[in-house]
Amino acid sequence: MEMKYLTLAEHAVREYAPDKIYMANQIAKRAAALYGEDKVINSTLGECMDDNGKLMILPTVENLLRNMSIEDMCSYAPIAGLAEFNKAVQVSLFGKEVSDHFVESVATPGSCGALRHAVWNFLDDGEAVITTNWNWGPYKGICEEHNRRLETFEMFNEYDSFNLKGLDDKIDELAHEQNHILIILNTPAHNPTGYSMTKIEMDNVVEIIKKHARNSTKKITLCLDVSYIDFDGTFEESREIFDSISEMPENVMVIVAFSMSKSYTICGMRCGALVCLAHTEEAMRMFKQAMAFSSRSVWSNTVRSAQKLLIDICLNSEKKTSADMERNLFKEIIAARSRAFLEEAEQCGLKCCPYKSGFFIAVPCKNSDLIAEKLKEKHVYIVAMPYGIRFSLCAVTKDKCRRTPKIIKEVLNNNAL
Ligand code: PLP
């Protein structure tokens, strides 16, 4: 039946789809008010909370924001970003300005905006993005919003390491149908599994890409979504993946989705960048032109104060050292929570996805919606995902992390399919 007074174009008509994560969070909050904070394990959101349930914000960030000039707070920024933003992004990501590539960083609203730019600009209509089957939910929505598709391959092989063959086969399959290949890999500290690809695995990914790039009609883009990079290992360990990508054929480009949300604890200030590691100045210039056009036409410029914050921290060694030290403390809190969860999981025989670092642990299971409902009855609130459930270490105290695996295991045993 035709709906009256509704003039939406057909492609814009959507099913009612409430945000599962925020809904679960609301229910958990109500339960905490009713039964007491201690009785409820609210592991829904992806923001870092301290043991008193307070949002964790780097003191250096808070200090700089509170003392920022009103002009930097309120004024427009240039479309692609403030003059020193590109340099600050490189210092944040690589420790210094990069000399072996031509690097450009176009400011975006978080890495979400960066991924949007990647999906729109590196594929044609109807083409598909390749990523892992465990993935951040909005990847699919970003593809659909832009008339693209999401194609996935199984993330882990039988040894619980990265499934290189799955990636190789998926590229092969899509290369028969489309000329652009865009691969998005979220590493290190992958959401939702906490997996970090090793340097050897990334070397192998590069070899696979090089093999497919021998067909010169194909244009291949590797997009590394490194939104959680500062919550993995040491700086050097977490950056090893970049060493794999130095030499690439002419028909390949590497781009990086950078986020300030986690590294600088400013999720709500919406700042990140899409970064290109180009082999020629011309390629870098074309990248910037395309991304700046997209920015201008979608959101115009992005939040100036957040860009200024990055510059103030990354281009001042004293402030950078403070921010890095503060973040290390946050990282240690999350690591201690992960150890508590995993030790207990091992004790009770709960099988988790291979976790190394980061905000989340995933437990593979069938019928995750049902499991999530059953867990709610025990006042444990998690996020149901297509291949299992996601537990947010970043939002739950160490004590609760220790209590949870047994409850999950029990619910899985009682609802085995
Ligand atoms: N990529 C992954 C894997 C994420 O988990 C998130 C946010 O949770 C993002 C990208 C987007 O983050 P933001 O847009 O806040 O930088």
Image (spheres, grey):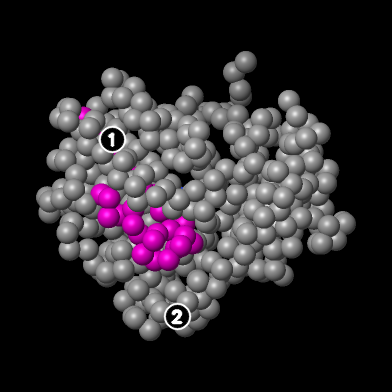
Residue type at tag 1: Ile
Q: Which mark is residue 322?
A: 2
Range of magenta residues:
218-245
Say few, some or many: other residues with alpha carbon within 10 Å of mark 2 (under 14 / 14 to 19 / 20 or more). Answer: some
Q: Residue at x 70, y 68 (%)?
A: 51
Q: Secondary structure at mark 1?
A: helix
Q: Position of residue 263 (x, y in %)?
A: 46, 64
Quadrant of the image containing the C terminus: top right
Q: Position of residue 397 (x, y in %)?
A: 70, 63
Indicate whether 74 appears above or below 402. below
232 sits to left or right of 183: right
379 in the magenta segment? no
Say few, some or many: other residues with alpha carbon within 10 Å of mark 1 (under 14 / 14 to 19 / 20 or more). Answer: some
Indicate whether 15 appears above or below 21. above
Q: Is residue 81 visible?
A: yes
236 sits to left or right of 400: left
Residue type at tag 2: Ser
N-terminal of the pair, mark 2 or mark 1, is: 1
Q: Position of residue 346 (x, y in %)?
A: 67, 49
Q: Are marks 2 and 1 in contact (CB under 8 Å)?
A: no
Near-viewer residue (201 or 193): 201
Quadrant of the image containing the N terminus: top right
Report how far apart the C-alphas of labels 2 and 1 lie in the structure: 40 Å
Indicate whether 43 appears above or below 383. below
Q: Which mark is residue 220?
A: none
Q: Which residue is mark 1?
A: 208
